[in-house]
Image (cartoon, helix red, strand yellow):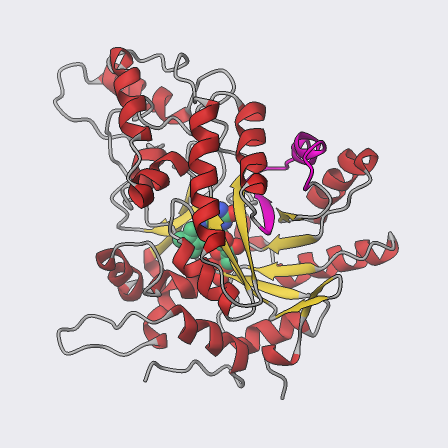
Amino acid sequence: MKRVDDFRLKFGKKEFVPIIVGGMGVDISTAELALEAARLGGIGHISDAMVPDVSDRRFDTSFVKDKTKFYKYNLDNSDKSSIKFDLGVLADATRRHVDATMQAKRGEGLVFVNCMEKLTMNAPRETLQVRMASALDAGIDGITLSAGLHLGSFGLLADHPRFRDAKLGIIVSSVRALQLFLRKNAKLNRLPDFVIVEGPLAGGHLGFGMDWAQYDLATIIAEIVQYLKTEQLDIPVIAAGGIFTGSDAVSFLETGSAAVQVATRFTVANECGLPDKVKQEYFRASEEDIIVNTISPTGYPMRMLRNTPAIGSGIRPGCESYGYLLDGNGNCAYITAYNREVALHPDAKTISVMDKTCLCTHMRNYNCWTCGHTTYRLKDTTRRLADGSYQTLSAEHIFKDYQFSVDQKVALPG
Ligand SMILES: Cc1cc2nc3c(=O)[nH]c(=O)nc-3n(C[C@H](O)[C@H](O)[C@H](O)COP(=O)(O)O)c2cc1C
């Protein structure tokens, strides 16, 4: 019976344990978590979501405070279009986050950064370019393009000295999205180094509509593997979404995937950035507690726990401090929903907004409990302590369980 360790992910002449820990913003996939994956010979991701805030917490900078102060005049204005990101600050914060992570890297594995296109930041092209270029400047091993079609993202990097040496890949959820990406980038003569195929059971935003349950990861992968074969393109395909055991992973590795990307199992790792209290919520969740809704202002469905504090919250939009989801015209669907409720309840002290949420503020405060579909199985991966809480696990334990387990078994902590 095969184990994940019988397989290797190959990038050129280099080989890796075919386990990738997926990017989880905002700082849920911390540097510590990513570094463990790399130390163990796999690939870890940090995320550049809200990176000035991450820098403030990690390096004691004051980027968010400074921005809030600068835009204080706009707090009571329902129009947030004047709020812009300082590209110098964005570059500085990204470099700090990436540089400190790469300096700490040990072992044979790699650390990538997850860059979401949907963080449009009121200047989509300029901000994405700065984010990606600064990460490359600071020595990141690779970039995973996510949450968007990224049709122009490679183009934004074409003049960067590391454009052809860094590992650059994209997350897709359909063969069509991949075809579009490849067609749009054909003239750059630079194929992606990897394609992550994320199915409907993943955490975070989904690349599907609310009909997500009709799709199946194995089927999408088979289509993509076939397409790449027909086109004679040799690009490693990486399966993601709902892969809970080493045996699940092996079934993908045996049918054309070069590696797996996993995340949910690591949300209860000691190294994961979620507060301990939230990790316990993930452990306690039952299958009925895991829902997919459309409260994210990005327009993508998102999976989360039913008791997520962000649901129904009517807080004032936090764009003066954050503003990561402002589109190119300075709009965000939460601002529209919030202003509508304020107009409907002019005398109310607090309001509730059900259809959208202020994702920036709630992700920053770990109040949006996004999770993968298999979260309800996390309780089976650990022991219950005397006080009724669940024991969190080391990332090494989870990683090695994926790497060595057989027979759908999950090793409990010692
Ligand atoms: C808590 C959480 C946060 C996530 N955040 C992001 C994110 O910011 N960007 C992204 O591309 N994917 C995100 N994902 C998706 C993962 O990177 C990964 O591809 C997917 O969840 C793998 O499936 P699994 O969780 O079933 O193992 C997130 C997943 C989880 C569980």
Please give the name of the residue rendered at 15% of the width and 26% of the height, measured from the top-left corner: 350
Question: Does the magenta portion include 156?
Answer: yes
Residue at the extreme front: 103
Does the magenta portion include 389? no
The residue at the point 25 percent across, 15 percent down is 72
* Callout count: 0
Q: Can you give x and y, in whole percent of width and height, for residue 268 in the image?
A: 34, 64
Evaluate whether residue 373 shows in this view.
no
Left or right for 156, reference 406: right
Q: Position of residue 216 (x, y in %)?
A: 61, 59
In this rendering, the answer to whether 321 lies above or below 97 is above
Residue sitting at x 56%, y 45%: 208
Residue 174, compared with residue 68, is above or below; it is below
Q: Is residue 97 left or right of residue 143?
A: left
Give the answer, above or below, for where 176 lies relative to 400: above
**Does 236 sit left or right of 26 as displayed?**
right
The answer to which of 350 and 2 lies nearer the viewer is: 2
The residue located at (49%, 22%) in the rendering is 327
Task: Quarter of the image for the N terminus: give it.
Answer: bottom right
The quadrant where residue 278 appears: bottom left
Rendering coords of residue 240 (x, y %): 57, 59
Would you say 196 lies left or right of 299 here? right
Quadrant placement of the C terminus: bottom left
Residue 29 vs residue 196, the one in the foreground: 29
The percent position of residue 146, horizontal first and vertical second, equals 56, 43
Residue 386 can be seen, yes or no: yes
Residue range corresponding to the magenta coloring: 141-162
